[in-house]
């Protein structure tokens, strides 16, 4: 499991990171709320652990912004606020779960395991329609109306990964890891070439989606 911990209390943040990593959970720790969005959108975490009261941007504000931009991974809010209306505010902002401070570390771990299982068990649709295209994961076909868009197996896998993360930046490292495996000798140039071919086929079909290059990071599939 890989998590992002956003906590401005230095003592609690340091202790939580230590305990998580002691349990084998890779943990990146940030201390200001304005770092949450960029980290979450550009890196691949299983769960975000966000303190409610953060400087520069609160955990709730960051949660709202992420959800508005299509972020789908699990989010756990940490807060000293335990009133019902506060819990409702946090959940309405898009949080999946809510843990009141002070908490036992064993409870935090149980919540993380539950959120991780829930995220990994999401069922993908076999057929997805977007921008005038129909993606059929069973038959590995991409259609525009009755026209088949010819994609190679690798092109289909890359495009499907972008579809799963519609509106979210997918770093080249994630594409490499998910499609070829992190130990592969495939280079960023190879990935760029595949994306260029996919983009050309989408443009020729005159659909309403496009693959944008995020310089130095990766790619984002968006509506035109």
Image (tube, rainbow, N blue to C red):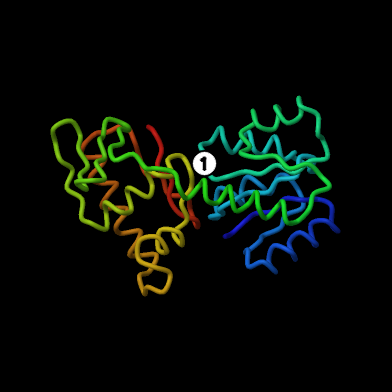
Residue depicted at x 36% and y 74% = 185
**Image quadrant of residue 10?**
bottom right
Q: Is residue 136 left or right of residue 130?
A: left
9, 18: nearer the viewer: 18
Q: Which residue is mark 1?
A: 72
Number of marks drawn: 1
**Image quadrant of residue 128?**
top left
Q: Is residue 39 left or right of residue 105?
A: left
171, 5: nearer the viewer: 5
Residue depicted at x 77% and y 52% = 31
- Residue 224 point in image, percent of width and height: 37, 32
Residue depicted at x 20% and y 50% = 151
- Residue 17 point in image, percent of width and height: 73, 62
Residue depicted at x 61% and y 48% = 38
Against 68, is 211 above or below? below
- Residue 135 point in image, percent of width and height: 26, 40
Q: Is residue 218 left or right of residue 60?
A: left
- Residue 88 point in image, percent of width and height: 70, 27
Q: Is residue 215 left or right of residue 221?
A: right
Against 140, is 174 above or below? below
Q: Can see residue 196?
A: yes
Query: Helix or strand or loop: what does disc 1 sit on?
Result: loop
99, 183: nearer the viewer: 99
116, 10: nearer the viewer: 116
Against 208, is 220 above or below? below
Q: Which quadrant of the figure contains the N terminus?
A: bottom right
């Amino acid at each position: 499991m890989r998590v992002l911990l956003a906590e401005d209390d230095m003592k609690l943040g340091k202790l939580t990171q230590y305990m998580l990593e002691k349990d084998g959970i890779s943990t990146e720790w940030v201390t200001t709320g304005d770092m949450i969005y960029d980290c979450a959108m550009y890196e691949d975490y299983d769960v975000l652990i966000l303190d409610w009261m953060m400087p520069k941007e609160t955990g709730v504000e960051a949660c709202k912004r992420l959800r508005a931009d299509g972020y789908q991974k699990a989010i756990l809010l940490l807060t000293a606020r335990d009133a019902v209306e506060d819990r409702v505010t946090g959940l309405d902002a898009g949080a999946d779960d809510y843990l009141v401070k002070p908490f036992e570390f064993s409870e935090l771990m149980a919540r993380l395991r539950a959120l991780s299982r829930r995220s990994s068990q999401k069922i993908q649709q076999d057929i997805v329609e977007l921008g005038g295209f129909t993606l059929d994961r069973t038959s590995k076909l991409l259609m525009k109306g009755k026209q088949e868009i010819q994609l190679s197996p690798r092109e289909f896998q890359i495009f499907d990964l972008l579809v799963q993360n519609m509106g979210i930046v997918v770093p080249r490292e994630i594409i490499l890891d998910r499609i070829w495996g992190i130990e592969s000798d495939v280079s960023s140039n190879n990935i760029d070439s595949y994306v260029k071919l996919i983009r050309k086929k989408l443009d020729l079909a005159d659909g309403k989606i496009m693959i944008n290059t995020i310089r130095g990071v990766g790619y984002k599939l968006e509506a035109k």
